[in-house]
Image: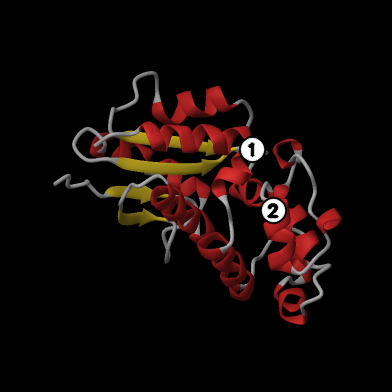
Amino acid sequence: MIVKTPINIAGEGPTDVAVMRRLLSETGLLCGTVYHGEGRRTGKQSLDGKMRGYLAGAVHVPWFVLRDLDNDGCVVEVRHRLVGETVPPLLIFRIAIRTVDAWLMADRDALADHLKVRLADIPINMANHPEPKKALFASAARSKSNFIKKSVSPASLKGRKISSDFFETMIEFVDYVWRPDVAAQNSESLGRALKALKQFQV
């Protein structure tokens, strides 16, 4: 009997955590404790500040850390700044280009159906879009569903605030509709993340 070791996870926010759980499930890995991305422990700056602790922890137990690149520059430079040259063997550190939202939007057909919008309302090649989150809000604002439309506030369209209803809509999408393998065909950073998880052994 093979006993799998749960993998501790840390992300920026609730949607990221849902994505991480889904990716672990899709690749046959077990999710352990969520150390960042829920409750008051959210945000990129907070996550970055705790990286040293995650690196130390990954010497003994497996960790999966996911961070958005946003517009922070080169992936290699960000990775080197946060992780250094030597990555602990039990750490899976991935950077979403440019955000986790781009990974979700890479499954265009499924997202269009979930948000009740036209396929044409979901942009193509989100890895090159400067602000995928704003693009996601703009797509949702065109929804035929009044509930989804109301969940996207004017502040959200400016990238400042996300309503709890919209969080729930997107987490439901991640949990039950999103197809990571399909999305990976349209997102290189997601494809690399899936490959790393599939090859990970604990």
Residue lying furthest left: 1
Measure the C-alpha gap from mark 1 to mark 2.
20 Å
Secondary structure under tag 2 reads helix
- Residue located beneath label 1 in the image: 185
Q: Which of marks 1 and 2 is nearer the N terminus?
A: 2
Residue 2 lies in what quarter of the image? Answer: top left
Point 37% across, 39% down: residue: 51
Point 30% across, 49% down: residue: 8
Residue 153 position, x and y percent, is: 74, 72
Labelled disc at residue 201 = none
Q: Which callout, 1 or 2, points to the residue nearer the camera?
A: 1
In this rendering, is residue 27 above or below 193?
below
- Residue located beneath label 2 in the image: 133
Residue 79 position, x and y percent, is: 48, 28
Amino acid type assigned to the residue bearing label 1 in the image: Gln
In this rendering, is residue 120 above or below 143?
above
Amino acid type assigned to the residue bearing label 2 in the image: Lys
In this rendering, is residue 171 above or below 119?
below
Q: Nearer the viewer, residue 134 or 7?
A: 7
